[in-house]
Image: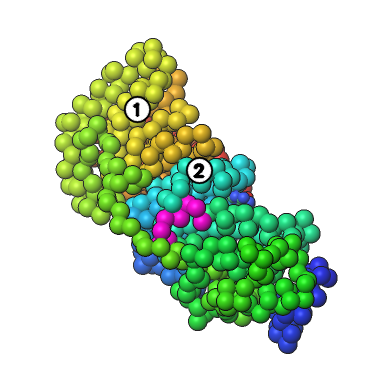
Amino acid sequence: MSIQLPPLFESRMQRWLGGEYEDFVASYDRPRHAGIRVNTLKIGLEDFKAASPFGLKPIPWCETGFYVDENERPGKHPYYHTGLYYIQEPSAMEPAEALRPEPGDRVLDLCAAPGGKSTQIAAKLEGRGVLVTNDISAERTKALAKNIEMSGVRNAVVLNETPERIAQRFPAYFDKILIDAPCSGEGMFRKDPDAVRQWEKHSVEVCTVMQRDILDTVASMLAPGGRIVYSTCTFSPEENEAMIALFLARHPDFVVGEMPHSPLFAPGRPEWAAGLAESGGGLSPLLHEPAQGGEPALRPEALAQTARAARIWPHLAEGEGHFVCVLEHTGEKAAREAGAAGTAPGPFIGAGEPMPAAEDGGRASGGPKGKGRREERGARSPRREDKSAREARGRGRDAYVREEASEETVRRACLDFLAAHVSVPLTGTLLISGGYAYACPVEPERLRGLKVRRSGFRLGMVKSGGRFVPSNALAAALSPRESARTLNLSSSLPEAVSYLKGETLTPGEERIERAEGVDAKGYVLVAIDGYAAGWGKWASGVLKNEYPAGWRWNG
Ligand SMILES: C[S@@+](CC[C@H](N)C(=O)[O-])C[C@H]1O[C@@H](n2cnc3c(N)ncnc32)[C@H](O)[C@@H]1O
């Protein structure tokens, strides 16, 4: 075997798997499986299948997931940069499927970085409802925010907080919560040899204490009748079945729910956890703590429920090792009125004068722009549009400089920019935070005092001289028909990669597609094969590249 497994891990697995052990270890010598998940916020599934640069083989438990050949280098295609797909390990696609988020839900993804499952949840929300996505690691939330933004998500808040502090602000708030728990990572030994080295450090003992605390805190954030999905990428029963059974003992208002794809996966193994408790063995100190009333911590009826969880085994499925368990709250779900606290309060654009929405809301509708585009945009009066753009410029400079980008200045500049450049039905509260304008999908006061990486959909900021600079998050979330000006590049020509590398392009004026009455000079949405990538600023045949340094194509 090419991987040196920790001896303690080997002996434990041998004991539990018995005759299956040989097949299990043999899987370490087989190549790992690579997957991509189509981002339906930006492209329809059928459109992607038709346009895919890679051979696709469906992943049976995720409709939008496909096995791909890693040698085709999916991270090195312009479509990756336009957020058309996310590169994700196939088994890791199951937890968000089991969560079953629906448009309009309030969802928390607590341990979210770098954002594989958050982007999957966001696609399922279809831009409606709220996604609060969090990670305790400040460094890792940078990648999380980037992935959320590159995927064109408009209704997410990105936090960098402890579960306890989030719970103080969001009691009984969420319909669905995903805990992709920090774990000892045994299921990643094949994918990531470093996980073997990390096993001692992120030991089962340490992880179980963290997992117990996370589960208890999360329970207080779930609305009655809500659903939690708990997942790990490890095999140890202490972190899986035993963890769930201990949770059920402390929280009798939860039951283990059915897994949506259970026939595809192996069941949970309650008997392994029971064996640990009976032998007084096991690597978790929690197994030896008596529950309330002096009863044994692991109760048989709670353990029995964990057979309904799913184990994904590398020797039985085409994916790495995972454990996924659905926890359903038995309380009654309360009906929520549209616009009730915490849901998006409604369009804010144009100070109560929303621009007309694209017919389909503009999502998943990118694609090559048809003839009809100008007609659709014609719904917006070109005269009004021109006037508003002129006013924004005219009022501009001096006023902005004098006001030193006060919140009101940023707010006004943002609204002016949106009015002149995009027609997009934004909802939420227009919030100014850290100099940036955001469309915030939750009541802003909930975020007060929290460490926030993104207060919502980042729209842009005012720079010196009073210029409003739109964010790339705004560009990535638009479809070309929602932009006043677009330059469409072809993925089959070097210009697409040049743009993604941050280079200046020199497109002629005739290539700047624009709404009626809009001249070519100014901010242009740059799209690749009809899918938005970022901004450029066009003047006199030169497109200044505004693609952010941190997103650029390397190598
Ligand atoms: C398995 S990874 C998450 C992967 C992620 N869900 C995805 O799909 O891309 C676990 C994450 O939990 C975070 N974490 C660890 N302890 C945490 C805690 N107490 N609260 C929130 N996040 C935590 C780690 O920083 C790590 O990024």
> At which x and y percent is residue 67?
53, 70
**Circle 2 SS class:** helix
Residue at (37%, 56%) from the top-left corner? 105
Tell me the residue that label 1 is attached to.
411
Q: Which circle's residue, 2 or 1, is located before the other in the chain?
A: 2
Tags 2 and 1 touching, CB below 8 Å: no
**Circle 1 SS class:** helix
Label 2 crowd bin: few (<14), some (14–19), many (20+), radius 10 Å: some
Q: Is residue 483 visible?
A: no
89 relative position to 510: left or right: right
Q: Amino acid at mark 1?
A: Arg
> At which x and y percent is residue 195?
72, 60
Q: Amino acid at mark 2?
A: Gln
Q: Is residue 325 visible?
A: yes
460 relative position to 146: left or right: left
Q: Does the segment drawn in magenta span residue 222?
A: yes
Quadrant assignment, res 72: bottom right
Mark 2 CB in 8 Å range of ligand 1?
Answer: no
In this view, the residue farthest toward the front is: 293
In the image, 79 versus 496, the foreground residue is 79
Quadrant assignment, res 486: top left
- Residue 204's place in the image compared with 362, above or below, is below
In this view, the residue farthest toward the bottom is: 19
In the image, 120 versus 322, the foreground residue is 322
Determine the CA span between mark 2 and mark 1: 29 Å
Q: Which residues are magenta?
A: 219-226
Residue at (39%, 50%) from the top-left corner? 130
Tell me the residue that label 2 is attached to.
168
> At which x and y percent is residue 458?
42, 38
Give the overall secondary structure of the magenta segment.
strand
